[in-house]
Image (cartoon, rainbow, N blue to C red):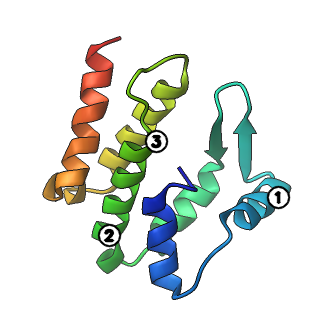
Amino acid sequence: MFTAAAVTGNITARLGREVDVDDAVTLLHRFNLFAVDEATATVCIHGLVQCAVREATHPDHQPALATTVAGALREVWPEVERGAGHQMLRANTTALHSNAGVHPWTDVGGRAALFQAGHSLGRT
């Protein structure tokens, strides 16, 4: 999800310059704040990083970030779900729903991501 166009576009817009996501991922991994699961091609970010980001995010930025996360989830969600990867996508959608308040529901893309997770869960 970190290299999804929704994420890189949001970061580029916020910073006003191109960003190298690989460098950020490498730095977080070096400090054991980010782990890559090669078997499922997923990553896990340490809970402290997640908490710090949530607490440091100004409320004015939350709607755009919720839209960005929802867009990234929709972008990387495979049409055919195989293996455990879709379970991680559902978990991320649950985290979006739990932490973003009403923002995912007020955006068409946010609702689409939430419904995608619900349909996925219904197929298991």
Badge 2: few (under 14), some or many (20 or more) residues near its Cα, within 10 Å? some
Percent position of residue 14, x then y: 46, 82
Sequence-wise first label, 2 or 3: 2
Q: Which mark is residue 31?
A: 1
- Which mark is in front, 2 or 3? 3
Amino acid type, mark 1: Phe
22 vs 35: above or below: below
Percent position of residue 20, x then y: 68, 70
53 vs 18: above or below: above
Sequence-wise first label, 3 or 1: 1
Asked whether the residues under the numbered discs 2 and 3 touch, taking CB atoms below 8 Å apart as contact, a structural biologist would say no
Amino acid type, mark 3: Val
Q: Which mark is residue 76?
A: 3
55 vs 1: above or below: below
Badge 1: few (under 14), some or many (20 or more) residues near its Cα, within 10 Å? few
53 vs 17: above or below: above
Relative depth, front residue between 41 and 94: 41
From the viewer's perspective, is 48 left or right of 12? right
Sequence-wise first label, 2 or 1: 1
Q: Residue at 35%, 53% (x, y): give it.
A: 71
From the viewer's perspective, is 80 left or right of 119? right
Residue extending farthest to the bottom is 16
**Quadrant location of the C terminus?**
top left
